[in-house]
Image (spheres, grey):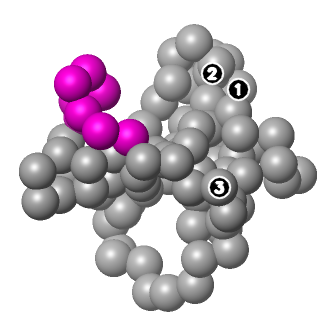
């Protein structure tokens, strides 16, 4: 993708992680200015810091850093560098 005159790589995590299923229709590109990379996602629920939360490790998966627990909700924490380093982009 051309962003402000510079080439930016857009990655689809569903494709990288081999997740099958229907797409929701509209999608959002979340940009990482530091790496000049973007992620194609169905939606963004919320962006937040990871202070004062419990992170449970997932030893079975080299692509998942952990599961972040916050009350009765949880989020799977995937590091973009780990995912793109483990697959050919």
In front: mark 3 or mark 1? 3
Quick one: which residue is furthest to the bottom in this view? 21
Q: Is residue 17 above or below residue 59?
A: below
Task: Give the quadrant of residue 74.
Answer: bottom left
- Marks 2 and 1: CB-CB under 8 Å? yes
Q: Which mark is residue 22?
A: none
Residues shaded magenta: 47-55
Q: Is residue 81 above or below residue 4?
A: below
Q: Is residue 23 visible?
A: yes
Find out whether residue 33 is within the magenta segment.
Answer: no
Residue at x 59%, y 77% (from the top left corner): 19
Rendering quarter of residue 41: bottom left
Q: Within the image, what quadrant is residue 10 found in?
A: top right
Query: Looking at the image, which residue sits at the far right?
Result: 88
Measured in 3D between alpha carbons, the distance from the residue under mark 2 to the one under mark 1, in whole angstroms, is 8 Å
The residue beneath circle 3 is 59
């Amino acid at each position: 993708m051309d962003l402000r005159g510079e080439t930016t790589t857009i990655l689809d995590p569903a494709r990288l992680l081999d997740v099958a299923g229907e797409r929701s229709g509209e999608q959002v590109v979340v940009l990482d200015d530091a790496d000049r990379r973007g992620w194609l996602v169905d939606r963004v629920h919320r962006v937040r810091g990871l202070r004062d939360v419990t992170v449970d490790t997932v030893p079975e998966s080299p692509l998942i850093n952990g599961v972040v627990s916050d009350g009765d909700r949880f989020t799977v924490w995937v590091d973009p560098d780990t995912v793109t380093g483990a697959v050919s982009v």
